[in-house]
Amino acid sequence: MSAKQKIVVVGNGMVGHHFVDEMAKHEGYEITVLSAEDRLAYDRVHLSEYFSGKTADDLALTTPEHYNELGVKFFTDAKVTNINKAEKVVSTETGDKYPYDKLVLATGSYPFVPPIPGKEREHCLVYRTIDDLDAIQASANSGKVGVVVGGGLLGLEAANALKELGLQTHVVEFAPQLMGVQLDKDGGELLRNMIEGIGVQVHTQKATQEIIDGEDCVHRMVFADGTHLETDLILFSAGIRPYDNLARDFDLQIGERGGIVVNNECQTSDENIYAIGECALWNNFIYGLVAPGYTMAKVAADNIIGGEQQFTGADMSTKLKLMGMDVGSIGDAHARTAGAQSYTYFNEPDDVYKKIVVSADGKTLLGAVLVGDTSEYDSLLQYALNAIELPEKPDSLILPSAGEKPTLGVDALPESATICSCLNVTKGDIISAIDAGACDVAAVKSCTKATTGCGGCAALVKTVTDHELEKRGVEVSTDLCEHFAYSRVELFHIVKAEKIRNFDTLIEKHGCGIGCEICKPAVGSILSSVWNDYILKEDHLPLQDTNDTYLGNMQKDGTYSIVPRMPGGEVTPERLIVIGEVAKEYNLYTKVTGGQRIDLFGARIDQLPDIWEKLIAAGMETGHAYGKSLRTVKSCVGSTWCRYGVQDSMAMAIFLENRYKGLRSPHKIKFAVSGCTRECAEAQSKDIGVIATENGWNLYVSGNGGMKPRHGDLFATDLDDETLVKYIDRYLMFYVRTADRLTRTSVWLENLEGGLEYMQKVVIDDHLGVNAELENQMQAVVDTYQCEWKTTIEDPKQLKRFRQFVNSKAVDENIEFVTEREQIRPARGEEKRYKGVQIHTVDISEPEAETV
Amino acid sequence: MTIEKQWQTICHKDDLVKNSGVCALLANQEQIAIFQVKDEMYSVGNWDPIGKANVLYRGLIGDTKGDIYVASPLYKQRFVLNSGKCLDDDSVSIKAYDTRLQNDEVQVLV
């Protein structure tokens, strides 16, 4: 076996992390991450949300657990100080050495602080890391006034942060206008007016000469024009500089004004060393946006595995919301291209400014500036990126829709059109996802990862997806079926709110017709989740699928299989013997299931009650293998027997299975409990997975095996028994209430707006204030549990239904078995004596017959 | 020679299950499914020509555009109860029988 290639990544910012995620997709590489920061990668794009309540954990892009799962080694507080290119080893400040085959520098950038005397004073800060934000917060607590130096994109974002911290906020800009890179003069002017309108003072054309003690505030900023401004806090946001010192010190080629020079493969001047993100200089340009960094990460990973992807530059168009104001900039915003002509729409009362820049021949869009209204951004960007021919009157694209407004149909987009630029997803990728079976926006998102970067393309992704689906004749409706113009969620609310207890009342009040095989079982399940009546009560019986009607799983020949519950897979020898005896007596095919219990096949409908009577007499109960309900809680023996177990997973599994057995839900639910991190019960592939830790339990949710495997998401860690059960109660009941019919928890969570994070807010923080209700509802279901088979065999009226014929004791002749490996199996067509329905002649000797 | 159809008495009306089906054996040993939908009764062959099993009486009852049907419990194809027509596959159909109540006895025209 050949040794794994060693990949060492220096830096764990957004781009470094993206590289790790890309690289970990490939086998045969040992990835080591060295980060100088004390925490793993987090989202710097949404950094300002730290002040609006998000925590460092919320912003985290990865976790130690995630890296462990990927098999990635990582070290924080590990600042690399030496690269030995000849021996291919890097070493850190503390002297630890890491040999590499390929080295990836993702060291990022640092904020540029202009060389102003006094810049070292206390409360003079930058805006880049979570630690910076903590420092800003601390400073803000002791002051009243804050100044941001720099009126670019980041500066305005920082100003917003200061404003949210309650400071009287100023922006000081050296240039004559705000956002000079992205906006033209008029756009910058409007933005300034709007920002001043919400109370942020803007000072343009101000060069700070020195910072000295203030009279009313901590500092006084003295400007070149003789004026001054007093403030308690100064934030520098005057651009970025690449962290390229490692490359400088160890002789990699550096650009004149900094940045590690890379080629189209993202390789530095040493072919075994790559540089990506804001530390890399490509074509004499440093990209300060995350999307080009992600592309570089992908290119570098591809080249390491021998691929041929190239980085060929990136579009710097941008759309964002600044202090509640929409701003967009595309391509050549300043009309610098030779012969370029502009169209402008300026609506001062409504604070809207739009400009498009078109080529000399008027056929292609070169650039655009949008302030106050960016609704046309998506289509303008597509015109620009794909050189789509402009309409005859290009200004119609930005004028208010007084008349006919040409809309860029998504059909006009070529398949190569980039829809999600963060993740580089094209229209062609979306079409392939749909061709491969994705049939809604959520499925397209999960397939392509589109919208998972900045999220700005969400609307376009939906439009393209819906359009492609429509082209394929897929109708997008959430109605349950033709009998109810409501979704399952809506029907659930109706049943609960109006206290409806049977199908007839519901369809009379809110539906039409008599129902069908779609709405009946769905409503049956809802009624059961809400009221938990015996499912074969006269009102409910006609709603159930055949499996529920006869409390068994129908097989291809019309016989049923029987599964007694074995909580946690635990069974006494006595019960095992009874199961064996029953199987022998009724000649049932016997097999151990994937859910750690035993399935007996080949029982005729008329045999079911007798079989269950024997099983129940031996202390067993129904396993609900036939229901859309809790199936099993798989487990390992945990600390009771295993040398490695850290908690009693067996007792927990049995407890959980007994608690949730009988809960009717939109689809089947599977659990597992593992007694230690070795995970023998495979809990991460289950709807609810519980894994023991030294301190309690880690809860995983919405995993799935089967057709579309999905790894469960870590929901909460180190829970005590009581909290674990509470969280599961809430999570499951929320799922039961809100999922569509026949939707497993995995798909449900992926389609849920806000996803895992939202569910954590709901379940852990009681974001919706419904937790008490969810728990009560679950408790009501738990308290009203009954073994359906026990109720059934005690009711003579029910027993009457378990016969093949109402007028004969004969058995169904079509059910025939042959023997294989010492057990029965259904006879195949050619093996059968019975040939289905034959042409029969009428027996005129029938005594009760009467001639018509 | 033509054979005239005759009413066969099958069972008591209490043997039926409301809004669901039961199975009965005709004199010629053929299996039929009898459904009670609200106050109406319907009889069809019990053999599922697609699933190839005697199971239709265990299917769910529904309606679409005025047709009342049973959906096979095996693969969900729908058969119209008063005609035997399959709504999902033109190539198959099942027999349908007239059904009536006579002195609380269920009778099928065979």
Image (tube, rainbow, N blue to C red):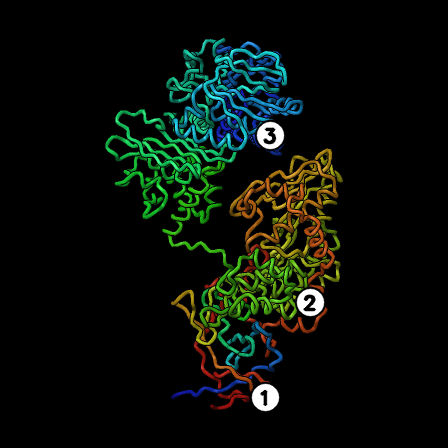
Report the number of discs: 3
Dots 1, 2 in contact, CB < 8 A: no
Mark 3 residue element: helix
Closer mark to the observer between disc 3 and disc 2: 3
**Which disc is residue B103 wearing?**
1
Q: Which residue is mark 3?
A: A68
Q: Are marks 3 and 2 on the same chain?
A: yes
The x, y position of residue A344, in whole percent, is: 34, 34
For the residue carrying disc 1, how many other residues have a C-alpha within 10 Å: few (<14), some (14-19), or many (20+)? few
Do we see residue A385 in this rendering? no
Q: Which residue is mark 2?
A: A792
Q: Is residue A758 above or below residue A90?
A: below
Amino acid found under the numbered disc labelled 1: Asn
**Which disc is residue A163 wearing?**
none
Q: Left of A314 or right of it: where is A65? A: right
Determine the chain carrying the residue at label 1.
Answer: B
Amino acid found under the numbered disc labelled 2: Thr
Tell me where residue A756 sits by quadrant.
top right
Do we see residue B109 in this rendering? yes
The x, y position of residue A77, in whole percent, is: 61, 19
Q: Residue at x 56, y 57 (%)?
A: A488
For the residue carrying disc 2, how many other residues have a C-alpha within 10 Å: few (<14), some (14-19), or many (20+)? many
The x, y position of residue A195, in whole percent, is: 50, 30
Q: Left of A51 or right of it: where is A409? A: left
